[in-house]
Amino acid sequence: MGVHDVSQKWVSGKVLIAMLLLVTVSAENITSQSNHTIGVDTNHHAQVFYHHTWPSMKFGWRIIVGSIVGFLGSAFGNVGGVGGGGIFVPMLSLIIGFDAKSAIAISKCMITGGATATVLYNLRQRHPTLDLPLIDYDLALLFQPMLMLGISIGVSFNVIFPEWMLTVLLIIFFVGISIKSFLKGVDTWKKETIMKKEAMKNSRIDAIATPEGAAHYIQTEDTVKDINEPKKKVSLVENIRWTELGLLFAIWIMILALEIGKSCTTTCSGSYWLLNLLQVPVTLGMSSYQAMRLYKGQRTIASKGDQQTHWPVCQLILFCSCGVLAGTIAGLLGLGGGFILAPLFLGIGIPPQVASATSILAMSFSASVAVVEYYLLKRFPIPYALYLVGVATAASLVGQHLVRKVVAILGRASVIIFILTFTLCVSAFLLGGVGVAHMIQKIEHKEYMGFGNLCMYKVKH
């Protein structure tokens, strides 16, 4: 069995888990309704009247502890390429005291701030082993439109799915992803150990070898040599793939315009559904355009470092499906979408540094659209959001700088994978715990736990 087959099976496993979660995740967005549901109609569909809970912004232990947790969540989340939403949402709800819907909205703000700062930091960085930018723009262009489509679906469906479907499969999902990431980290660590031993052995050989022997080593051990030799410096302008970045911004602007237009319509009206459906050809068209270029060999995922010039149709469809699922789950849970993209990129052979940077780039576009949607819905207090965005932004820059230093000192990129695994485990514990607590509370109060009706959803400002 080839490496390509192993990678495809690894990815397929991710999709199966994600499909299970798709039917269950949105309940986390409505767990707060145990305190905010005013009535249920005669057809047993939840008629949700959302009334927010916004704590006053006073200096005290809640803000201090919340800031520390948010700082660590952003630092670890952005280094791992997942954004940190799995830590932000419980922190905002349990520590600072926001209701769950407001916590999800502010979480998106924090993810956007941290991700944007990380992208700006990564724009100047180079691929760890190849003469390429750190960000794989071709990979981002394939996934980002599908991720944004999924975000829109997730935000629209956040009042439909019932809570009882969430908790167990949510934990299973995160535990499964964490185990996969941990095993990938262990495998990468072992490979790095072998390479470091070979490098030490070869350095000793070089010290006593003749010039001819040294020349022979250089010809036969190019991989080790390439890893150790410094990369050439390039300017910021040369390090950015402007065409692909322009296409990413174009799709972002189009989706943002549709979302703003949708906010001006009546829910479930003809205009509402028209603007929703227009997102499908816009996003699918852009991803299909990139997929066709990869299929024909006009573009390549060069960051993998292999010579694969033609990607099979089934694999491209699988990747696009993963993008939609990641975005949908992100919109429902207030997460960044990177918790699927980052492990997925690792599974197809992308280096950890590139996987993290590319995941964060795609996530920054999708999260910012969700922020605009939540702002139009008046889901968060602006002063509180600005403060927490500042915390997340500073943390992401500090985290990137420190981890880059650690990777350089240790010579082990697997550190990034272990940070990703740690973030996923913490997210599983926090989100799972909050979900169980809210579900028990609803059962005790004998509250409605069935499906909601999107067209009956109203907001009290």
Image (cartoon, rainbow, N blue to C red):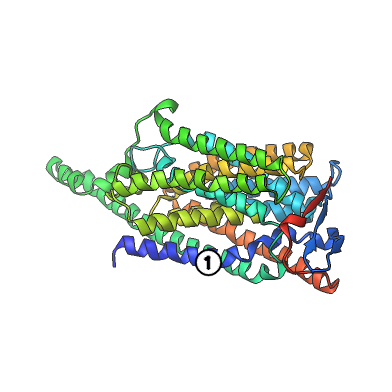
Residue 91 in view: yes
Q: In which quarter of the image is the C terminus?
A: top right
Rendered view: 194 above or below 366: below
Image coordinates for residue 322, horizontal then vertical, percent: 49, 57
Q: In this view, does 406 lie to the left or right of 187?
A: right
Occupied quadrant, residue 230: top left
Image coordinates for residue 341, horizontal then vertical, percent: 50, 53
The residue where tag 1 is placed is: 17
Rendered view: 187 above or below 140: below
Rendered view: 410 above or below 211: below
Q: Is residue 160 left or right of residue 218?
A: right
Q: As rendered, which of 19 and 347 lies closer to the eye? A: 19
Label 1 crowd bin: few (<14), some (14–19), many (20+), radius 10 Å: some
Q: As rendered, which of 438 and 401 lies closer to the eye? A: 438
Q: Which residue is drawn at 46% across and 36% down?
A: 247
Q: Which residue is drawn at 80% across and 50% down?
A: 96
Q: Which residue is drawn at 61% across and 44% down?
A: 275
Image coordinates for residue 148, horizontal then vertical, percent: 56, 47
Q: In this view, does 15 lie to the left or right of 219?
A: right
Q: As rendered, which of 457 and 350 lies closer to the eye? A: 457
Instruction: Check disc 1 and give the amino acid type.
Output: Ile
Q: Which residue lies furthest to the front in this view?
A: 270
Report helix, strand or loop for mark 1: helix
Q: In this view, does 51 lie to the left or right of 208?
A: right
Image coordinates for residue 398, horizontal then vertical, percent: 59, 39
Q: Which residue is drawn at 48% across and 57% down?
A: 321
